[in-house]
């Protein structure tokens, strides 16, 4: 019984000492803060540029991009380029047989040769005064028509690049039987790039032609401008169609990738900008804390624009003020602060 009593008394003494120790530690911490200051971190305010952006996702493509289709139905006999090749305007990419029925190339070629021979013979007769000007004009017209028909037939069996650019897709192989209207290849001119974005009506008032834009994906980016905005809302999308044009890079950028596009809608140079988490709110007013003579001072601020993360400050803070960025929740007006590195 005696041993049990001693044990209980010992436990009680330990509990009393522990409680006293906690009070001592708590008291010492408060005393330290009063003597040395509440620990805070600060940053010196300097004028900077406030930027507000709208963000969209879109597909990037060459400034010119075209899917070239077959005008005839026949077997592909030759392909003169592969995906990734750079080709020039009017370069022949796909060839069909000369006797392709839909092109009538052989007939057009024969008619052209006959018309050319007749034209040259009639020129000599006209020079000798043997035929009238009217007869000469009729022959010349027939010659030009036959030449145009031949060129059309040539373009039907020799499919050319509509402009200079990269072959980004090939949809056929040599020996394939294709039908009229079938996709043959895609050409993309990547001297510049473009993307179509859809702007909701809540943002359309802040958008205008010429605004700066940046397209980002992975660790790459392109810079450009907002080049056009529709004047009427698309009723299916319930948004306004806009086009953004970007400058090219020395490194080839694959057409068809999805990019994040940021458009700077507001740019204000030489102004004070602070993070939202450095501000506190009370009575529908915003306040910031600065350090003056090692003491915390509460300053009411007048905000301007904000993007939810950063605030433009119109008044209340000045260049050179030491803004408290960490420890705000512990400070109070006039308290001593200790600036931490």
Image (cartoon, helix red, strand yellow):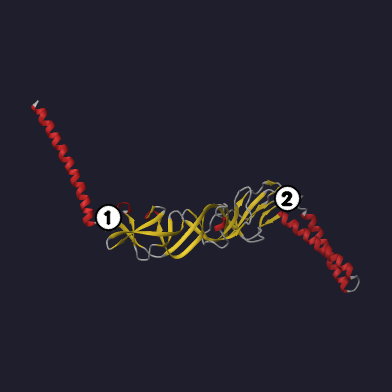
Question: In the figure, 7 relative to 34: above or below?
Answer: above
Q: Quadrant of the C terminus?
A: bottom left
Q: Which mark is residue 72?
A: 2
Question: In the figure, 135 relative to 2: above or below?
Answer: below
Q: Quadrant of residue 331?
A: bottom left
Question: In the figure, 202 relative to 125: above or below?
Answer: above
How many C-alpha atoms fall within 10 Å of the one at disc 2: few (<14), some, or many (≥20)? Answer: some
Q: For marks 1 and 2, give the one nearer the viewer.
A: 1
Q: Which mark is residue 53?
A: none
The location of residue 45, given as percent across then percent down, is 37, 63
The location of residue 178, given as percent across then percent down, is 69, 47
Residue at image location 83% in from the left, 68% down from the top:
120
> Visible in this render: residue 260?
no
Residue at image location 47% in from the left, 53% down from the top:
218
| Nearer to me, 296 or 41 | 296
The location of residue 239, given as percent across then percent down, is 59, 51
Q: Which badge, 1 or 2, comes first in the chain's sequence?
A: 1
Residue at image location 37% in from the left, 55% down from the top:
278
Q: Which residue is mark 1?
A: 39
> Visible in this render: residue 95?
yes
Q: Identify the residue at the far top of this view.
A: 1
């Amino acid at each position: 019984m005696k041993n049990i009593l001693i044990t209980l008394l010992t436990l009680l003494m330990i509990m009393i000492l522990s409680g006293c120790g906690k009070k001592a530690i708590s008291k010492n911490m408060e005393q330290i803060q009063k003597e040395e200051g509440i620990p805070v971190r600060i940053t010196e305010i300097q004028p900077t540029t406030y930027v507000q952006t709208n963000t969209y996702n879109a597909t990037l493509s060459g400034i010119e991009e075209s899917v070239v289709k077959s005008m005839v139905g026949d077997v592909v006999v030759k392909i003169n380029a592969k995906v990734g090749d750079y080709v020039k305007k009017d370069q022949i990419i796909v060839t069909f047989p000369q006797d392709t029925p839909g092109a009538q190339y052989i007939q057009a070629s024969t008619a052209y040769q006959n018309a050319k021979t007749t034209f040259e013979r009639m020129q000599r007769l006209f020079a000798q005064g043997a035929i009238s000007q009217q007869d000469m004009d009729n022959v010349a017209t027939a010659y030009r028509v036959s030449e145009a028909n031949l060129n059309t037939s040539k373009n039907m069996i020799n499919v050319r690049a509509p402009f200079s650019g990269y072959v980004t897709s090939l949809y056929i192989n040599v020996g394939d039987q294709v039908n009229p209207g079938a996709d043959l290849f895609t050409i993309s001119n990547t001297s510049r790039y473009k993307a179509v974005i859809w702007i909701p009506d809540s943002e359309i008032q802040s958008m205008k032609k010429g605004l700066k834009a940046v397209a980002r994906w992975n660790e790459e980016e392109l810079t450009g401008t907002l080049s056009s905005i529709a004047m009427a809302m698309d009723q299916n999308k319930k948004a306004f169609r806009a086009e953004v044009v970007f400058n090219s890079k020395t490194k080839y950028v694959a057409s068809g990738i999805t990019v994040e596009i940021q458009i700077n809608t507001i740019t204000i140079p030489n102004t004070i900008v602070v993070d939202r988490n450095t501000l506190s709110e009370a009575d529908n007013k915003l306040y910031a804390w600065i350090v003056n003579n090692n003491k915390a001072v509460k300053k009411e601020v007048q905000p301007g624009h904000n993007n939810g993360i950063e605030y433009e400050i119109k008044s209340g803070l000045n260049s050179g003020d030491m803004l408290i960025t960490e420890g705000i929740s512990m400070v109070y007006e006039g308290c001593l602060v200790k600036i931490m590195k």
